[in-house]
Image (tube, rainbow, N blue to C red):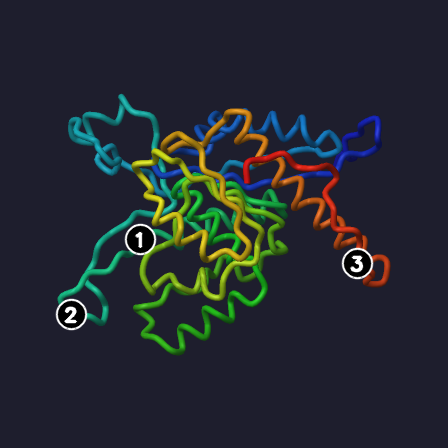
Amino acid sequence: MPPPAKTAQGPQTSLKILMLHGYTQSGPLFHSKTRALHKALTKALPTHSIHLSYPTGPIHLNPSDIPGYNGPPATEAEGDTEPAYGWWRRKDMPHPSKKGETAIFYTGLQDGLTRIAETIKEEGPFDGVIGFSQGACAAGMVASLLESGRRDAFSSSTCQKDEMETEPFPASFTSLHQPPLKFALIYSGFTAPGTRYIDFYKPSLKTPTLHFLGALDGVVEEGRSQGLIEACEGAKVVTHPGGHFLPSQRPWLDAAVGFIKECLEQVAVSDRGEQNGGTKGKEENVEDMDVPF
């Protein structure tokens, strides 16, 4: 294993972030859309070696799976479209216990979480996660699953409800050597709907989160994003004036970078306090943050 990279201040600290793309995207495409964020992190954290990992969802989507697609059948269009992937598919199905009612199921969710768990095992452990749209929903799930006590919440729920009504705790997450995340950045995020997925969000998430909302987002309505915000303790929210995309302008990059720096400093303060026999350190940031919280 190569030695840590060095700066004028000494060896660099590794900062690993898991990057989860949106529905109909891919790891490489999300990489191209987040170059500005990567550059901003590298500039703002010169004592860190930044590593961003971009897995691709396991579900290969057909053009007909893409919202708004009105082109030819999939077999005719495949050669003319960019590869599109998802972490799961949404499907309306008969409710397992309420006759005549429908319920929303995320088919393939366990496969999507397995792909993420494989990335954590092979490229982690990670300090944080950043997700966009469906990837932001997945990021919330991942942050939840890595928190202590979450598996007990799933087990308790399974005992109280019909197995068909409860999403099981992912087997792929049971043996991961990955501590709780230090932060999660959620761009146009939302919760998985219905009681089947409630164990991801109750008890509420303790991982520090920053949520970005688009004032003109016509894909993920603010009400859906608000559900995830309310499921996260102490969540911070930033609203940008655009639509359904990851903003790359300076104010929004500053907000993202400032939040990550704040979270890393809080962890460092906590670690120093433990090393000093539990004495609480001075809870201040390295520098005053000028971000649009």
Find residue 272 and report its horizontal and vertical position in percent: 81, 53
Q: How many marks are shown on the rendered structure?
A: 3
Residue at the bottom extreme? Answer: 160
Q: Which residue is mark 1?
A: 107
Tell me how far mark 1 sits from mark 3, CA to CA.
Answer: 46 Å
State if disc 3 and disc 2 touch (CB < 8 Å): no
Answer with mark 2 or mark 1, whichever residue precedes in sequence: 2
Q: Tag 2's secondary structure?
A: loop
Q: Which residue is mark 3?
A: 280
State if disc 1 and disc 2 touch (CB < 8 Å): no
Indicate the quadrant containing the C terminus: top left, top right, bottom left or bottom right.
top right
Residue 272 vs 197, above or below: the answer is above
Q: Which of the two discs, 2 and 3, sits closer to the camera? A: 3
Local packing at callout 2 (Cα closer than 10 Å; few below 14, some 14-19, many 20+) is: few
Q: Tag 3's secondary structure?
A: loop
Answer with mark 1 or mark 3, whichever residue precedes in sequence: 1
Q: Quadrant of residue 2?
A: top right
In this rendering, would 54 be left or right of 197? right
Local packing at callout 1 (Cα closer than 10 Å; few below 14, some 14-19, many 20+) is: some
In this rendering, would 153 be left or right of 269? left
Q: Residue at x 44, y 37 (%)?
A: 21
Q: Nearer the viewer, residue 255 or 147?
A: 255
Q: Which mark is residue 99?
A: 2
